[in-house]
Amino acid sequence: MQSTLGAPTLSAIFFFLIIVGLTLAVTYWAARRTKSASEFFAAGRSVGAFQNGLALAGDYMSAASFLGIAGLVALSGYDGMIYATGWLVGWPALMFLIAEPLRNLGKFTFADVVAFRLRQAPVRVAAAIGGILTLIFYTIAQMVGAGNLVTLMFGIPYNVAVVVVGAVMLAYVLFGGMLATTWVQIIKAILLLFGVTLLTVLVLAEFRFSPGALYQAVSARYGAGALQPGGLVTDPVEAVSLGLALMLGLLGLPHILMRFYTVPDSRAARLSVVYATGFIGYFYLIIPIVGFGASALVGRDVILAMDRGGNMAAPLVAELLGGTPFLGFIAAVAFATILAVVAGLTLAGASALSHDIFLHVIRKGGASEHEQVRVAKIATVIFGVVTVLLGVLFKGQNVAFMVGLAFAVAASANFPPLLLSIVWKRFNTAGAVASILTGATLSVGLIALSPTVLVDLLGFKAAIFPLRNPAIVSMTAAFVAGALASLLTHEPRAEALFSDEKLRVYLGVGAE
Amino acid sequence: MLDSPEFHELISRRWRMSLVLTAALFVVYYGFILLVATNKPLLSTPLGSATLGIVVGIAVILLSWALTAVYVVWANRHYDPAVKQLRDRLR
């Protein structure tokens, strides 16, 4: 099969310019409505539940899940589907445990919730460490992926691609704040869902709209093994540990959690999770069809020849079934996906630096609205420049494990203090700091000692820590450390304020 | 308000609901993962032109939707009205 992949085609450039033009126009519109801190960080709490559901889905459906899972299914068959289910199951858990209390207690960041009745400075600093570590690992994976993808699809040099992504997303966040970032996510989510739906319909049309005929074609070409579990999940402890990180890591991702402050109340927060779960579940239901279609129609050899990771499976099947224009559309959508996700990460990083560190630690809560927005914009530029530098620094590195690392840190350092601060009266400052630092140190440290880093990356024969994902150990340890440190110390003020917290969590009394 | 039995009842009902649904989600998802890890032949059973594994994988997503729906219907029908009643009393 002849492919135009790797060269900038007219249709790809056309769709790319339309998407960038549209999103920059939205940014211009949003910039005129973004003056106060609450507008910059939380879109003035004016986003509807349906819109926020789409924006949450947009934040979560990264290029890794679109191109990566389609590729994994195309190359390994059923094992890719196991991954797809793992990416969805965090959403119901987020709904049952965190969403409504988070909305009622916080203002702009998840640290607002943890620090609600505790001593501000130590808790904010610790929470910023956990939050920013998560964001940095997530950002490295996105930026390196972005550079590689754009090079692969458009033939643009890696460093140029990284700088373009950095510059455009910085324009969204810097001028349009959360309102622009939200609408960029919504546009991207609609384009992505539309593109993947069209791709699914085109694939199924080749098999007279019978998934059975598609499965038959796959097993005729690659054997029954393509539809059966293979080598991805074999060790039960490893499988559960990865599952815990995927599921509960979502409940500690700062850029996802901050979206709940953009809606007016906890009822809208709850409904936005329903919409997000619907869109994301639908996405992961149909993505395997695209993957199986690529394997049956394009062939694993052609996909592998283009990219060893299989990332080009979806673009290749798009080109086969819809010609160069459809490939151009899918390539532009993949690019928009990266832009939107990185913009969300940058805004979350800026809010940790300016709201948690500058306002609450350096200024002890006293800074004018004007100054808060100015510092937020400076923090945005700092985080944006760091993002581009990280992309350049990690060029050519195998960063696939960084997403897993981000989820492990989120599940271990951010989720335990968040949950404990909501449900446990005795939880106090010492407990929060202990659980965050334990979770962050153990999750990063154990991954550094794991087979992923020691064997795969550095070439040692054996690893010191046996699991590839440490969440089962690091998250448990964070809960234990939080409980022990709280029980060993006394903080009467934190316990006294728990009544206020309850009124606010369950009745919304005093919520922002 | 803090001492009222209705407020305590509201909080414990909310967490009972959350924990039951979270437990169900854990059984569904970790059950699936552990089945993949420990009993591959079962999931490889052909089912039409697909396999049992494909059907179970799709079922995990559909069940996640169902549990989410149960929570939101419960919250809209029972939790929100109870909250409103208690808030009115605070005024």
Image (spheres, coloured by chain):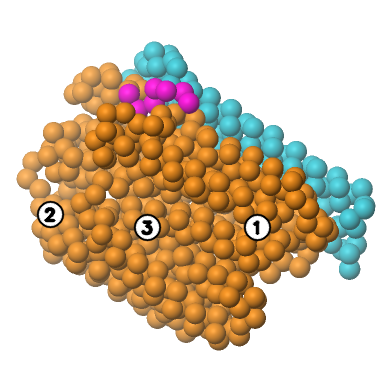
Chain colours: A orange, B cyan
- Could you tell me the amino acid type at mark 3? Thr
Q: Is residue A238 shown to the viewer in this render?
A: yes
**Residue at the outermost right position:** B4
Mark pair 3, 2: CA separation:
24 Å
State yes or no: discs 3 and 2 in contact (Cβ < 8 Å).
no
**Residue at the outermost left position:** A2
* Left or right relative to A246: residue A92: right
Q: In which quarter of the image is residue B39?
A: top left
Does the magenta-highlighted stretch encompass residue A265? no
Point out the stretch of residues depicted in magenta: A231-237
Q: Earlier in the sequence, mark 2 or mark 1?
A: 2
> Mark 3 sits on what residue?
A139
- Badge 3 marks a residue whose secondary structure is helix
Dot 1 surroundings within 10 Å: few (below 14), some, or many (20 or more)? many
Mark pair 1, 3: CA separation:
24 Å
Q: Residue at x 54, y 46 (%)?
A: A439
Vertical arrangement, residue A175 with respect to residue B13, above or below: below
* Left or right relative to A214: residue A268: right
> Mark 2 sits on what residue?
A6
Vertical arrangement, residue A99 with respect to residue A342, above or below: above
The quadrant of the image that shows the C terminus of chain A is bottom right
Q: Earlier in the sequence, mark 1 or mark 3?
A: 1
Vertical arrangement, residue A65 with respect to residue A466, above or below: below
The image's mark for residue A114 is 1
Dot 2 surroundings within 10 Å: few (below 14), some, or many (20 or more)? some
